[in-house]
Amino acid sequence: MSGGVDSSVAACLLKEQGYDITGLFMRVGAEISETDGPSPASGQARQRQGCCSASDAADARYVAGLLNVPFYVLNFKDDFDELMDYFADEYAVGRTPNPCVVCNQRFKFGKILDYADAIGATCVATGHYARIDRSGGAPSLRRALDAQKDQTYVLFGLRRELLDRVLFPLGDLTKDAVRDEARRRGLPNCDKPDSVEICFVPDQDYAGVVKRRRPDAFREGDVVDQQGRTVARHAGVANFTIGQRRGLGIAAGTPIYVTRLDATTNTVTVGSKPDLLNDRLWADGVNLLETPTSQIFRAEVKIRYLHRAAPASVTILPGGFARVDFDEPQSAITPGQAVVFYDRDVVIGGGWIRSPGDESLEKDQQEHPEQECTA
């Protein structure tokens, strides 16, 4: 229970369905500013930056009290510190991390499942917009009914054997329906704004978080064009992400974008919008929730949370690698982001984007055949 309307309604629905539930709140120790109106429970002003703040904990405890269910706060501060290190490390090497995916893997469906085992609980439920289909024998992860709120992209890392222990009570509801359910039950957080951005990034200052943890990632270097000619200087590759247009400090007659980051040479490459297009990517850390019928299969593929899934051929390779060949070139394929494979509304699996169109990765996967993808 995060204190938001989604997890609160999920708890209400489960209790009405006869489940014996226990509410859990993750205390992560991240500094989160709060200034957007009073918390229903605490009356304190707060800004909806992320989740897991003190007022969020108060809201979660308040709803648990309304439901008359046990409520506990789990302290993950030390473990969450490792997640913030991952975030900083990725930016330092020119990749754009997705900490929400990692948080789901390590905490919500990792350490919290361990806690469930410790207290004898059979399942873990969250307010994610996703569905578990148990009609065909082995459970499968499916997109939520509300396509605008579907969160399966950030859930691809769930281990297949855990799907039978996961509940998503909101999977068949729209966001408006969830708020209506909250109002009907008199929940004080029924109109609470959704969390946005990343909970441990105050004021959306990504570079500030990285600089405090990895100051050596901020070394001056060259900004070069597509021909390798120096056109400007930069203050560190960790300030940039693929597809970025603003904040480049370069005067040009046409819009220019970051097209490549190379931490090894400390170089930022820029180009025009067409230079962002690529019809192939390589991924590592592949996790399969379904068993493909062959090594090469067709899928709809998402390369970021708000990306519209595009048709592609996916090739599963030894060493936990995959190659994705899109039918049409995609823009701003970003190393460090998740890539997720779908068969209509079923999540086949996914991995982490390592590079767009870098043929040298074939050598990597051949040299590490013992590291099979997770299935």
Image (spheres, rainbow, N blue to C red):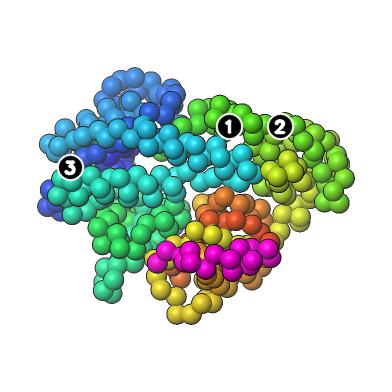
Q: Please give the name of the residue rendered at 85% of the width and 48% of the height, measured from the top-left corner.
A: 228
Q: Which residue is mark 1?
A: 214
Can you tell which mark lies on residue 219?
Answer: 2
Task: Please name the amino acid that badge 2 sits on.
Answer: Arg
- Foreground mark, 3 or 1, reads 1
Q: Please give the name of the residue rendered at 14% of the width and 49% of the height, measured from the top-left corner.
A: 120
Q: In the rendered view, tell whether residue 60 sits above or below residue 305.
A: above
Q: Please give the name of the residue rendered at 18% of the width and 46% of the height, measured from the top-left corner.
A: 118
Q: In the rendered view, tell whether residue 179 sits above or below residue 204.
A: below
Distance from Cα at disc 3 to Cα at disc 1: 39 Å
Instruction: Please tell me which of labels 2 and 3 falls first in the chain.
Output: 3
105 or 340, nearer to the observer? 105
Can you tell which mark lies on residue 22?
Answer: 3
- Local secondary structure at mark 3: loop
> Which quadrant of the view contains residue 187?
top left
**Segment tinted magenta in the rendering:** 359-375
Instruction: Please tell me which of labels 3 and 1 falls first in the chain.
Output: 3
> Can residue 118 be found in the magenta stretch?
no
In the image, residue 348 lies at what x, y percent? Answer: 43, 67
The reply to whether callout 2 and callout 3 are in contact (CB within 8 Å) is no
The reply to whether callout 1 and callout 2 are in contact (CB within 8 Å) is no
Distance from Cα at disc 2 to Cα at disc 3: 48 Å
In the image, residue 298 lies at what x, y percent? Answer: 53, 75
Task: Please name the amino acid that badge 3 sits on.
Answer: Thr
- Local secondary structure at mark 2: loop
